Image (cartoon, grey):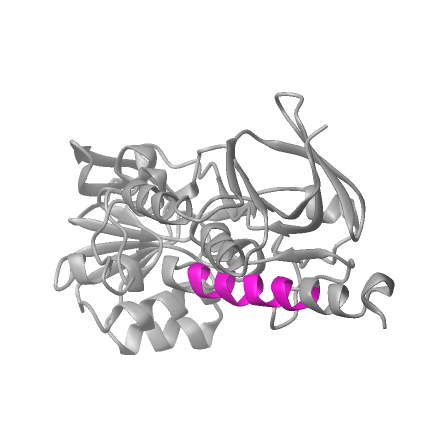
Amino acid sequence: MNPLVDVGIIGGGPAGLSAALVLVRARKSVIVIDEGRPRNRVTRESHGFLTRDGIQPGELRRIAKEQISAYPGVQFVEDTAVSVTGSDGNFLIQTGRGEEYRCKKVLFASGMKDLPVEINGLSDVYGKSAFVCPYCDGWELRDRPLVVIVKGAKALHLAKMLSGWTDRYTVCTNGPDELTDEQREELKQHGVPVLDSPIKQIESVDGMVQQVVLEDGTAVPCTGIFFAPKLAAGSDLPKALGCKVADSGMVVVDGLGKTNVPGVYSAGDAASELYQVVNAASLGSLTGMGINHDLISEAWYSDDKAI
């Protein structure tokens, strides 16, 4: 049995690593458990992070771990957390390799995971010329002809957003558009074509999209794609512990990452729908401070500190 540490962090992405940095600098002992399969591993570059714009996601993690490791009290474990039991002050994390780690607090920074999107050829271009976030990758596709694969209210929302980067895009809903008459009219007024034939194939060369071919024979030439991903929670463990979880899979937390379960916290994509590296790191930092505050308060008012 490993010794009791202050905080067990499940997930070693920007949120978990940012929290770890705050906590080790606050002289807390931390273990970071991560399986090494981040959602953004298919992405060549990460954007929007001040001083690290354009960095490879793996390099960002490498630098973070190197800097955090300069402080005492941190341990990195490449493994998968499969269960969390216990209660505030004494949790037990068990991993896929049969290891057990005890901690006073648990932070879930396990992010979200992509579910398969059944479109032929999408996996060939995802992370190379097909993306999900204009703030992350819109600059690289500015003024280019794009296809937007999305339906319903999200189609109108994404069309509005993309207008800041390019006015050359076609919405392909891959089946019934699920738009209201008002939404169709608004898109029409702004000159946005909407095609509802199912997508037959995304044609590409070395990951760079050439065109999107529809079942009705229409071919839409393009050099980039934005699409709405299908997401699920990166871990089911928060729900198993009794944490309140939204329909989207997001863990419900307060402003400092606290869940409704004492001693359990969540940060980053696992607890937010702002799926950007800089946001995840920010939320991880805030949650790290919140956890440290709780640990300090508990020690301050503990019976053995009473005069």
208 inside magenta stretch? no
What residue sits 52% from the left and 49% below the top? 111
> Residue 191 at x, y = what percent?
23, 72
Q: Where, quadrant-wise, is the N terminus in this rendering? A: top right
Magenta stretch, overall SS? helix
Residue reaching furthest front?
307
What residue sits 31% from the left and 50% below the top? 131
Q: Is residue 273 visible?
A: no
Q: Nearer the viewer, residue 161 or 232?
A: 232
> Residue 2 at x, y = what percent?
68, 31
What residue sits 43% from the left and 40% below the top? 38
> Residue 117 at x, y = what percent?
44, 39
Q: Where, quadrant-wise, is the C terminus in this rendering? A: bottom right
Q: Quadrant of residue 184?
A: bottom left
292 inside magenta stretch? yes
Residue reaching furthest top?
97
- Magenta residues, as a range? 280-294
Q: Nearer the viewer, residue 88 or 128?
A: 88
Q: Is residue 22 left or right of residue 82?
A: left
Q: Quadrant of residue 276?
A: bottom left
Q: Is residue 92 left or right of residue 61?
A: right
Q: Is residue 23 left or right of residue 54?
A: right
Q: Nearer the viewer, residue 184 or 101?
A: 101
